[in-house]
Amino acid sequence: QVQLVESGGGSVQAGGSLRLSCTASGFTYYMGWFRQAPGKEREGIALIYRGSETTYYTDSVKGRFTISQDNAKQRTLYLQMNSLKPDDTAMYYCAANSRTYSRRPGPIVGADFDCWGQGTQVTVSS
């Protein structure tokens, strides 16, 4: 199974920026970012297909977050987070599908991913 290792979390004041990274140990068809705040359900926030400019975002992060991948091997995933808000405070998880390009239409859901990172904490203070 493909292993995913995240880095880049931390604490920042509202309005600040952070960049998360995730490195995959093998081939993936698409990768994404999820987050889970205490007492809330896991939320899929961004997704990108391998070698493609095609991306998807949940409404709450559109215009503030940007998902991208390195051009050389498409094994490193990034999430640039700008204009951070206290509501963005959560554990952020990298995820990947190592089996197929297919995914369910609609929101980004965890059932479409078979590989998960360990998570990295992002804390935004007001």
Image (spheres, grey):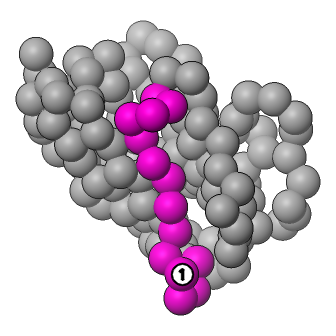
Q: Name the residue rendered at 65%, 50% in the picture.
A: 55
Q: In this view, does 80 lie above or below 89?
A: below
Q: Name the residue rendered at 23%, 47% in the picture.
A: 18
Q: Quadrant of residue 65?
A: top left
> SS of the residue at dot 1?
loop
Span colored in magenta: 61-74
Q: Is residue 45 above or below residue 26?
A: above
Q: Name the residue rendered at 25%, 22% in the picture.
A: 85
Q: Estimate the x, y position of residue 121 in percent, counting from the top left.
A: 28, 40
Report the side of 103 relative to 56 (left or right): right
Quadrant in which the N terminus appears = bottom right
Residue 11 in sight here: yes
Q: Is residue 45 above or below residue 68?
A: above
Q: Name the residue rendered at 39%, 21% in the picture.
A: 37
Does the magenta portion include 19? no
Q: In this view, does 74 lie above or below 58?
A: below
Report the side of 94 relative to 27 (left or right): left
Report the side of 74 relative to 1 (left or right): left
On the image, numbered disc 1 is attached to which residue?
Answer: 71
As shown in the figure, which amino acid type bears the numbered disc 1? Answer: Asn
Q: Quadrant of residue 50?
A: bottom right
How busy is the neighbourhood of tag 1: few (under 14 within 10 Å), some, or many (20 plus)? few
Q: Estimate the x, y position of residue 43 in percent, counting from the top left.
A: 56, 27
Report the side of 106 relative to 51 (left or right): right
Quick one: 41 or 63, which is closer to the camera? 63
Residue 35 in sight here: no
